[in-house]
Image (tube, helix red, strand yellow):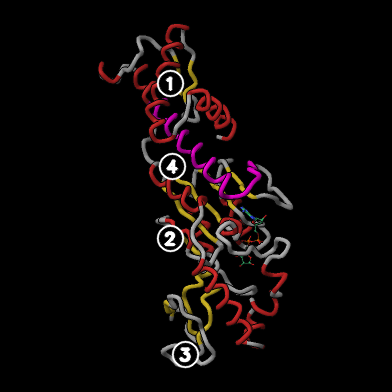
Amino acid sequence: MKNEKKRIVVLTGAGISAESGLHTFRDKGGLWDEFPVKEVATPDAWEKDKAKVLHFYNLRRQQVREAEPNKAHYALTELESDFIVNIVTQNVDDLHERAGSKNILHLHGDIKKSRSTVNQHLLYELDQKDIHIGDKCEEGSQLRPHIVWFGEAVPEINNAKKLIEQADCLIIIGTSLEVYPAADLLYYLRGGKPIFLISPEMNHIPDGVTFYQGVATDQVPIIVKKLLNMHDLEATATFKNNFKDNNMSEENKGPYTKVDGKMSDRGIWAAEMDPEAEDKFDKYLHLVAVNKAAKAEIARRELDAIYEELLEDF
Ligand code: APR
């Protein structure tokens, strides 16, 4: 059994910030209803009416400033105790950062930064400020928002692909998966590994994806809890397997006297035990659950249900 931590990539879109008060783009009444894409989010729009584009992003920045991370942003940070977690976000807000996530890749830019229009490597922290016509970079060009517009390259896409190729699990939250290349990223997860998708509604659910229908603040904490419990179960399985192989010291044996069992190829305990041992296994799992309850408040029944569900997912 490997002891290294599993890798989870979380791909987020506007939906995770919706309950923080930031509008999504394509929902009814979304941003693109009020501000047509072609007028504010393309290189042509910038050429045609810079003031209008700046106004649109100044408003976005102001709203981000007033927003706070929500339960979904915070729940994701908990995964970092047991997993290597990378957030790949299409969002230009900083709510993942403010919630405390460590590894965040912004695919579509960062609303809190401005950029030179002659040298894309010249970036400036705006902090809370607006960008005005006449604000210039050190090479004398008008500053623009550090945002990837429609029709522009997505410089971070290869880094995002690499992260997903190395992942053991992908969680997708609050994106319509209608904008490419981000919408293709899920296909870089290798070998039928689990993909969870959280959204209140989707036009299309890609094959092989487990859909958790609902809002992010409800569903993300549920999935996070499941994944943390799975980690506990795997740790229990390792314990059991070691015990079976007589690799464990007397004091670490817990309540067991005899267990016949084997590890499944998925690293999850698939036990065949005699009734006496099974009873002890149950008691042990209960103890594990009760101990972990201090952290997660899980009863054994719930653990069993989660275990069954994870067997299907993994
Ligand atoms: N919780 C979770 N998901 C939600 C919630 C919520 N509370 N509210 C809405 N959603 C879902 C919607 O059902 C929709 O599927 O979030 C998704 C938002 O989709 P879009 O508005 O298309 O946003 P996104 O997918 O992030 O857009 C991708 O397109 O406009 C460009 O550059 C912009 O990064 C953006 C990209």
Cβ–Cβ under 8 Å for marks 4 and 1 = no
Kindly identify which residue carries mark 3. Answer: 136
Q: Residue 6 carries which label?
A: 4
Task: Kindly report which numbered mark, 4 or 3, lies closer to the viewer in this rendering.
Answer: 3
Task: Kindly report which numbered mark, 4 or 1, lies closer to the viewer in this rendering.
Answer: 1
What whole-number distance in Å separates the C-alpha atoms at marks 2 and 4?
24 Å
Task: Kindly report which numbered mark, 2 or 4, lies closer to the viewer in this rendering.
Answer: 2
What amino acid is at disc 1? His
Residue 32 lies in magenta, yes or no?
Answer: no
The x and y percentages for residue 101 are 42, 55
What whole-number distance in Å separates the C-alpha atoms at marks 3 and 2?
29 Å
Q: Which span of residues is magenta-colored?
A: 210-238
What amino acid is at disc 2? Arg
Find out if the beta carbon at label 3 lies less than 8 Å from the nearest ligand 1 atom: no
Q: Residue 98 carries which label?
A: 2
What amino acid is at disc 3? Lys
Q: Which mark is residue 286?
A: 1
